Amino acid sequence: MAVYKDAKRGTWYSQVSYVDHHGARQRTTKRGFEARKAALAWEKDYIALHTDAPSMTLNAFYKQYEADKTPRLKLNTWLTKKHIIETKILPELGEIKLSEITAADILRWENELLSYRDRSGAGYSQTYLRTICTELSSMLNPACRFYGLRSNPMATAGKIGSTQHDEMKIWTPEQYERFAEVMRDKPMSYHAFELLYWCGLRLGELLALTKSDFDLDNDMLSVTKSYQRLNRKDVVTAPKTAKSVRKIVMPKFLTEEMREFFRLAKYLKPRDRIFQISKSYMHHEMDRGCKEAGLDRIRIHDLRHSHVSLLIELEYSIPAIAERMGHESTDITFQYAHLFPNKQGSMANALDKYRER
């Protein structure tokens, strides 16, 4: 291995020869370094990764992890992981070699996360703490499987936080109607919230809708994509999961509302996004509507929970609700189990009647 100055370009390059994990001799060259020090640093990390990965720092391994992961993930999924890794993990653990990260290091790091408070005095939520820990474990697992790390210290330290979300809030139809009434002054906002509440859409699914997704003659809405604003660009991708691709039958009143909306919005072409507004605009409108209607603020995603709650109250089956929502049936069971107690009572009454026959 050696570092050289490129006389023509005025930059540095490194030539590396090494024996890889399989015992085969390899050779590679990397050019374009502005300084000799940078070429030497790259050479050190490259050799460590390809001959003895555990001797490299977590910062250096992150570059390989990124190269391995990005071809396999949606852009928005990777950007979420990237933000957590670069802001919550690497600042504390990045300079430690993979082989030297101990359970004690992780416990200290977790305690730092637990002690964090923002300007209002609030800490990280239990689910966010668990997400951060999961990201670190997800980095270390491939280091064990593919790059020679003996064990994942996260398995010894354990994860903090919880997979259980905070208790969801829901609106009854009566509460939603109060909200919807004050939103009528802005047709774009009104129709957006109508679709969210009466169809149970995710916000990204709503913002990706085009006129061609509606079959108003058959009261049908097709959900086939999701909208994100990433790196200052509008990005439309496949929905969250394969189950999320679905057809939703709309109630007749909603079909007629959308028919009237399209009649007035003659500028819309079939492939245009209907709601060319931002997520922040929708959150602002949610704030406005709650204040004017005198309602406690709920999250926009809680409108989706409210839709499921209404379907449960109407006594539809778990598989039927799951199909409409783009969920697995088990997701409905676990997430919304607390909404079923009255159904348990009706089940017991039905069994009593059966026994008495």
Image (cartoon, rainbow, N blue to C red):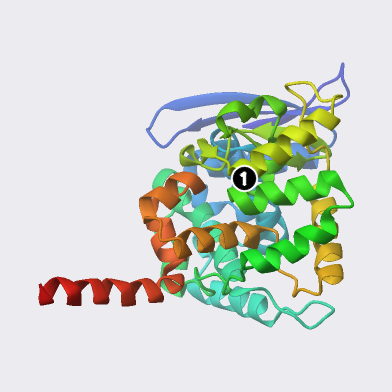
Q: Is residue 41 above or below residue 307?
A: above
Q: Is residue 295 above or below residue 142?
A: below
Residue name at image x 62 percent, y 45 percent: 77
Q: Quadrant of residue 122?
A: bottom right
| Frontmost residue, 114 versus 351 | 351
Q: Secondary structure at mark 1?
A: helix
Q: Residue at x 53, y 61 (%)?
A: 310
Percent across and percent down for residue 227 are: 70, 38
The residue sitting at the front extreme is 357
Residue depicted at 62% across the width and 51% down the height: 198
Is residue 97 in view from this perspective? no
Q: Amino acid at mark 1?
A: Thr
Q: Observer-nearest residue: 329 or 34?
A: 329
Q: In front here: 90 or 60? A: 90
Q: Quadrant of residue 34?
A: top right
Q: How many marks?
A: 1
Location of residue 260 (image quadrant):
top right
- Left or right of 316 on screen, residue 39: right
Quadrant in which the N terminus appears: top right
On the image, numbered disc 1 is attached to which residue?
77
Q: Is residue 183 visible?
A: yes
Quick one: label 1, few (<14), some, or many (20+) residues within 10 Å? Answer: few
Query: Can you give x and y, in whole percent of width and height, for residue 163 in the image?
Result: 49, 68
203 to the left or right of 260:
left
Q: Residue furthest top?
A: 8
